Amino acid sequence: MDKQSLRIVYMGTPDFAVESLRALVEGGYNVVAVVTMPDKPAGRGHQLQFSAVKQYALSVGLPLLQPERLKDDTFLEQLRSYHADLQIVVAFRMLPEVVWNMPRMGTFNLHASLLPQYRGAAPINWAVMNGDAETGATTFMLQHEIDTGNIILQERIPIAPDENVGSVHERLMTMGANLVTRTVDAIIDAENQGVAVSTIPQDNNIELRPAPKIFKDTCVIDFSCNAEQIRNHVRGLCPYPAAWIQDMPASHPLAEILKGAKVYKVAITQCAQQKGHIIVPCADGYVDLLELQLPGKKRMDAAALLNGLKNSLNTQH
């Protein structure tokens, strides 16, 4: 068996999943169909928006399936009709057993963490929010419990002290695509030797950090934390969905004005005040809010924001 004869069905939705699909297509692997989310209404006009994976699949002429329900009989029949040897999942939904167990070689998943750490929906965000110095990506075979299957390949990358989640996401996306093609190659090599691909069970006896889905409440900045925790929280949510201010210390002169503002970058400082800066006290010192976005306004640096406030106050008097 080679990469042209191995029949692959690929499942994914966002940008992160496009890079791996592109690597398979451009690498000459035989992707026979793509499964992605149904189109969703988005924006002011509620026009139907295609997922990033659908846009790419259409651009290269791949057959598409967009089931509302993964246990739907019509979808399962269509999926079976592609006679996949292997399914690959990158940033998709939780699959029922009837789907992941369908191909004779099973289904593997690319997860953007060093499993068993950060099982869940938002592994890249949580690694940065927790101040980790490294993260990585893992390919593993799907089984019943989410993100618990046996590991095929794993690779690490460092997280720079000032790096935000957007930058880590981009690097993992590229590295992950390479990991996916290497995993397929390993599965083909094993098949040609008449054995299953070599895997390692995940170690569940260590202290595990979860990576649950991020909600609006998750993104609130807690100024009662220490400065490093606040800085990491902001990095881990920048540029998306962005940390935001619900409450500042009531004594702060901008407490009311900055309610609801998104914060994209902060620095740790020992200064309580500095001209052109927005400095907020926290548990062990102060944080300097460097880049913000007031509700309904553009993202800007603190000096520009303060200037704008000063000008609007001047025009009101």
Image (cartoon, rainbow, N blue to C red):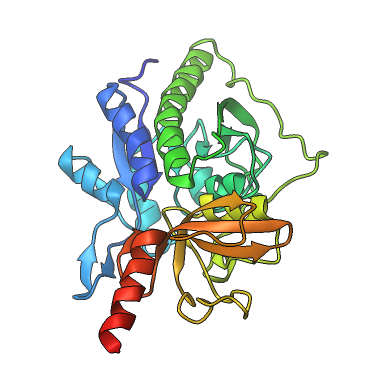
Q: Is residue 301 above or below residue 160?
A: below
Q: Residue at x 45, y 31 (%)?
A: 176
Q: Is residue 241 above or below residue 58?
A: below
Name the image quarter holding the N terminus.
top left
- Left or right: 160 as drawn, with respect to 13: right
Q: Is residue 138 visible?
A: no
- Residue 305 percent across, percent down from the top left: 36, 66
- Left or right: 284 as drawn, with respect to 129: right
Residue 247, quarter of picture? bottom right
Q: Residue at x 62, y 79 (%)?
A: 251
Q: Is residue 26 visible?
A: yes
Name the image quarter holding the C terminus.
bottom left
Q: Is residue 34 above or below residue 244?
A: above
Which residue is farthest right? 205
Q: Residue at x 25, y 84 (%)?
A: 315
Front one among 283 and 207: 283
Which residue is farthest bottom? 317
- Residue 304 percent across, percent down from the top left: 33, 62
- Residue 88 percent across, percent down from the top left: 44, 37
- Residue 261 percent across, percent down from the top left: 45, 71
Front one among 201 and 279: 279
Q: Residue at x 51, y 45 (%)?
A: 100
